[in-house]
């Protein structure tokens, strides 16, 4: 269960990091 939670948190963090880049390109 912990691994699954870490996976979700990792995905969320990656998405947050990708947001500013997408805004800069827009």
Image: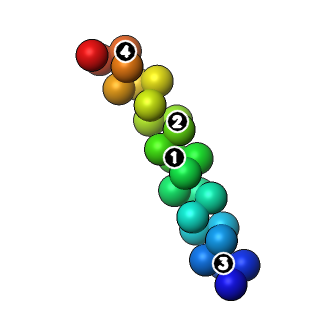
Q: Tell me whether the residue at label 4 lies in contact with that at label 2, contact meaning CB atoms closer than 8 angstroms.
A: no
Residue 14 is marked as 1
Report x, y in % for residue 10: 59, 57
Q: Tell me whether the residue at label 3 lies in contact with that at label 2, contact meaning CB atoms closer than 8 angstroms.
A: no
Mark 3: few/some/many CA within 10 Å (<14, 14-19, 20+)? few
The residue at 68%/84% (across/down) is: 1
Q: Tell me whether the residue at label 1 lies in contact with that at label 2, contact meaning CB atoms closer than 8 angstroms.
A: yes
Whether 22 is drawn above or below 18: the answer is above
Tell me the CA gap for discs 1 and 4. 16 Å
Whether 23 is drawn above or below 16: the answer is above
Q: Which residue is mark 2?
A: 17
Mark 1: few/some/many CA within 10 Å (<14, 14-19, 20+)? few
Q: Which residue is mark 3?
A: 3
Mark 2: few/some/many CA within 10 Å (<14, 14-19, 20+)? few
Tell me the CA gap for discs 3 and 4. 33 Å
Q: Secondary structure at mark 4?
A: helix
* Quarter where residue 18 is shown: top left
The residue at 44%/31% (across/down) is: 19
Earlier residue among tags 3 and 2: 3
Report x, y in % for residue 6: 66, 67
Earlier residue among tags 3 and 4: 3
Q: Which residue is mark 4?
A: 24
């Amino acid at each position: 269960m912990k691994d699954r939670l870490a996976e979700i948190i990792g995905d969320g963090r990656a998405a947050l990091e990708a947001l500013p880049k997408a805004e800069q390109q827009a």
